[in-house]
Amino acid sequence: MSIKRYCYSCDLKDDSKLIAEYKAYHAEGKAWPEITKSIKDAGIVDMQIYLTGNRMFMIMEVNDAFNPDKKAAMDAQNPKVQEWENLMWDYQQELPWAEKGEKWIALDKIFQL
């Protein structure tokens, strides 16, 4: 089984109180179990989110079963995931170059050693 890596970026609203609340939702063991299950069920074997200022970077390692379009379709049919996503919009904001309603933007790899 091969592992692929996907990297994305998203901004949080530039408000220290909101950023602290967002971090609390993502603290170890605090994410809703339905969310972590949906991530794993999609073929994501590891996911990490990093924060600098209000800009976040998400790195996902996925197995052969992962398909971003399939994950989006699964999420659209899952009421608990939709509830989580709506809640996260209270903290997140679109990157300046994002399409309307688009949160996480794929990063382009420009260098590899």
Image (cartoon, rainbow, N blue to C red):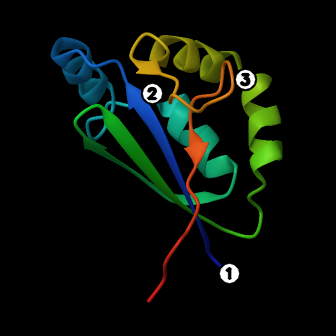
Q: Amino acid at mark 1?
A: Ser
Query: Which quarter of the figure is the C terminus placed in?
Result: bottom left
Mark 3 touching mark 2, by CB under 8 A?
Answer: no
Dot placed on the residue nearer the N-terminal end, 1 or 3? 1
**Would you name the residue on which mark 2 appears?**
32
Residue 14, given in percent of the width and then of the height, sits at 27, 19
- Distance of mark 3 from mark 2, alpha carbons? 13 Å
Task: Identify the secondary structure beneath mark 2.
Answer: loop
At x 54%, y 33%, the residue is 35
- 13 relative to 2 in the view: left or right: left
The foreground one among 89 and 41 is: 89
**Would you name the residue on which mark 3 appears?**
78
- Based on the displayed image, in which of its 4 quarters is residue 3 positioned? bottom right
- 55 relative to 15 in the view: left or right: right
At x 53%, y 19%, the residue is 84
Q: Amino acid at mark 3?
A: Asn
- Based on the displayed image, in which of its 4 quarters is residue 92 positioned? top left
